[in-house]
Amino acid sequence: GWGDGNRGVIFVNGFNIGRYSGIGPTKTLYIPAPLLNRGDNTILVWSLFEPVTTITFSDQLDLGK
């Protein structure tokens, strides 16, 4: 996962989806459907401190209430 102190940026098919931080508050990044290709898509996770080994896709929003 993101880890408590980890932070970085996520790109999907060359588009910057947003920044993430393990300390929150937001736990969800939104990928607009037009950015996705049928078939293969490229996801780049640029992590500042620790490697990110897992990404979870969900149709549920988590704003870290």
Image: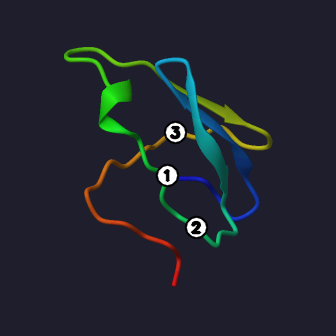
Look at the numbered discs 3 and 2 and tell me whether their residues touch, using CB distance below 8 Å: no
Residue under label 2: 26
Quarter location, residue 8: top right
Residue under label 1: 29
Residue under label 3: 53
Rounded to the nearest whole Å, what is the CA distance between mark 3 and mark 2?
19 Å
Q: Residue 63 at x, y = what percent?
A: 50, 72
Quarter location, residue 4: bottom right
Q: Does residue 29 sit above or below 16 in this rendering?
A: below
Q: What element carries label 3?
A: loop
Look at the numbered discs 2 and 1 and tell me whether their residues touch, using CB distance below 8 Å: yes
Q: Which amino acid does label 2 sit on?
A: Thr
Q: Residues within 10 Å of mark 3 (few under 14, many from 20)?
A: few
User: Closer to the N terminus: mark 3 or mark 2?
Assistant: 2
* Residue ID at (43%, 44%): 55
Q: Residue 59 at x, y = what percent?
A: 25, 57
* Residue ID at (29%, 55%): 58
Q: What element carries label 1?
A: loop
Instruction: Name the outermost residue toward the left.
Output: 38
Look at the numbered discs 3 and 1 and tell me whether their residues touch, using CB distance below 8 Å: no
Q: Is mark 2 on a helix, strand or loop?
A: loop
Q: What residue type is labelled 3?
A: Thr
